[in-house]
Image (cartoon, coloured by chain):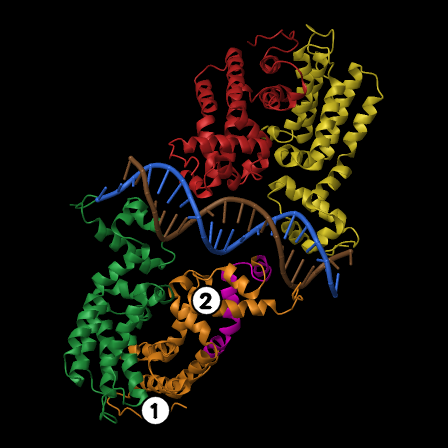
Chain colours: A red, B yellow, C green, D orange, E blue, F brown
DNA sequence: TATGAATGAGCATTCATTCAT
DNA sequence: TATGAATGAATGCTCATTCAT
């Protein structure tokens, strides 16, 4: 009675949407399957038809939304390790983050929880590979720190910059500019150079 | 001394120690009071003699270990907003982080969980005040980003730099140097300046 | 032939085969329809096309495989209550057990579960009728025990004799011999007789 | 209100009592902790204060009630392997069964379920050791079967003999007598002997 | 002759918390 | 300064079953 829910074929997608929303908003552990189910007006058992476990939902999200990062890493692996490549990596990473913001906020804010989900290690490996593409293992420690900071400043952007007023897109560009600057300064032979005004677009 | 229950009367302290260790290691939600009690070889009820709730343990930790940050902020409020002050803030912050590493790792990795603990907001306010002391509200967006990044790169240091080999103390100094550089570059009138080699100690 | 789905149209049979295998191996309650379906590479719903309920699968098994016992009882009812008849009953029962071993092991090891399946009572009645054909109600208590033991020693053979080394068929014959001996000793007027070497084949 | 249940100190015992009763009556899997708790008028959580898992309840029962069998086996191990010893083993086993009847009925009727409880293997080992004390490994197959049957006829007594009318104690003695007879007949050098009237008491 | 999608009831287990002693 | 015993509420998950297609 009422609307007796016609078996819509998009339930799996809807579960993922709601789950990500709640995970990002309240945290992974605090979000119960009951809550997700209720919000979708289905039973918990329905969730289990589509996903084998709660963790499986996260895996699904990661596979669907984490793809751009994988692509980026793969692409970067084929490029020469030039400064230009590194700058392009940052540019693309910035965009990838924007397109999957909730997922990354979720990972960022639930590191402890995510750590013992199967994807925790996967994700960590990705980040290591990504930073590995930016830093030169033989460079000075500070330069390596610059590169890693470049990446993580972008993550910080997901929440720490909320305090800043201004158009989100402007902020994103500013963050990218600073990150680019850091990577540029870390480039071998660039020491003592002028901080270039940046070329982020 | 040397007994399994050294120096009676310090149970409160021991609870905090074990709790912080477990919170940082496994996450706040995943750590149960049963686990803490077992590890201390007391009953759960004993925990409740010393702390009113689970959240209360965190509050206690924060009051005891978060103090240096409070002091830092208060001190900074009395100083002139010069570049030197900002550099000194970073220096002190770096040290504060080192001395309370597990607490900060815990906060960092459990943001979602901490957010709806009473100290969540408190902590957020502190960070806002802290970044407020570094950045100039009228400065360009990129400069503000530089300042915020300076702070958060230090947080990232708590885990992201594990991938880097080298003495932890060396890494800390390198991170501080980069942060200092960022804040320096953000200083009004410094644009186009040479990146100074840094003065972190 | 030889394909994973040999001879379409025999699904009902295949369900019974797999179900019995799993029921005997893991127990009735521990075996879920999901498991059966997965092993057959069909959906749970398919099972419901062939059987109205889980219990129905057991009923089906019983009807198909329990038949020899029914036949045996019916046949025995028409025979004179002589010692020879009783010996023949044991011989036939031994063979019936062998031919439907998994079913009997299942019943043996899941008595509690089977008890509140509709066939539980049916099965019990059969056993009562069967022992009724061997024992003489007016005989001494020990003689009655001998007869009942004769039957149940054969059930024990389904698992308890695993510990014994030797060819299964040899064991079966030995069990039959002992059972025959018991029934023979229970025969009115046989007391004080020599234990005959047995005539089991 | 009503009788606000004074914290009685015997809850653990009461749990075991009710659990065994229900396990024996309805089966292990079919008996839920909710049911046990309700029957005791406590919450499920209270059960978990006393037992770590459902399985743990069974383990507790086994430790408390299975003791006599352990004692018997240990005692038997110290005795000479004479016919008299074997007869005494049967006598004691018969009594042990009587004193822990519900536990054994439970094991008997829930073999499948018990098999993958930790005590399943334990129990099996006990039975193997027990039968090992009766049979002579070098004897003929039929003699070995006789010995194993002797033991298992007693188990059968727990349910199969319900059909027999008569005082339970009389039945027990009759079963013991038949079992004794079987073991006696299996004794080396006894072949062709007269079936002795038995000496069970 | 099946499947895809779902349900309702239930289960074992865990948790933070309470309170009399 | 603790403990023993318990609770109420929740959680993730599984199961047999249904039904439209």
Chain of the residue that carries numbered disc 2 in the rendered image? D
Q: Position of residue A7 (x, y in %)?
A: 37, 35
The foreground one among C53 and A91 is: C53
Residue C174 is marked as: none
Q: Are marks 2 and 1 on the same chain?
A: yes
Label whose residue precedes the other's in the sequence (2 or 1) = 2
Q: Which residues are magenta?
A: D45-73
Q: Position of residue C123 (x, y in %)?
A: 28, 69
Label 1: which residue? D198
Chain of the residue that carries numbered disc 1 in the rendered image? D
For this view, does B31 lie left or right of residue C130?
Answer: right
**Overall secondary structure of the magenta section:** helix
Q: Position of residue A196 (x, y in %)?
A: 62, 7
* Secondary structure at numbered mark 1: loop
| Distance Cα–Cα, label 2 vs label 1 | 36 Å
Determine if residue D186 is in view.
Answer: no
Label 2: which residue? D23
* Secondary structure at numbered mark 2: helix
C120 vs C192: above or below = above
Q: Residue at x 43, y 80 (%)?
A: D93
The foreground one among B103 and C104 is: C104
Determine if residue A141 is in view.
Answer: yes
Q: Position of residue D36 (x, y in %)?
A: 52, 63
Mark 2 or 1, closer to the camera: 2
The foreground one among E6 and C85 is: E6
Say if the magenta span includes residue C199. no
The foreground one among B15 and C42 is: C42
């Amino acid at each position: 009675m009422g609307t007796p829910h016609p078996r819509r074929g998009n339930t799996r997608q809807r579960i993922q949407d709601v789950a990500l929303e709640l995970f990002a908003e309240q945290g992974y552990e605090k979000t119960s399957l009951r809550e997700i189910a209720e919000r979708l007006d289905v039973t918990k058992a329905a969730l289990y038809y589509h996903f084998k476990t709660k963790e499986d939902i996260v895996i699904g999200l990661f596979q669907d939304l984490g793809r751009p990062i994988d692509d980026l890493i793969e692409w970067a692996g084929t490029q020469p390790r030039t400064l230009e490549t590194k700058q392009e990596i940052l540019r693309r990473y910035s965009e990838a983050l924007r397109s999957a913001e909730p997922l990354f906020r979720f990972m960022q804010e639930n590191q402890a929880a995510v750590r013992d989900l199967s994807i925790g290690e996967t994700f960590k490996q990705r980040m290591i590979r990504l930073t590995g593409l930016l830093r030169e293992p033989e460079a000075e420690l500070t330069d390596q720190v610059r590169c890693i900071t470049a990446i993580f400043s972008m993550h910080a952007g997901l929440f720490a910059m909320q305090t800043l007023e201004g158009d989100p897109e402007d902020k994103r560009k500013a963050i990218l500019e600073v990150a680019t600057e850091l990577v540029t300064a870390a480039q071998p032979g660039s020491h003592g150079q002028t901080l270039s005004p940046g070329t982020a677009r």
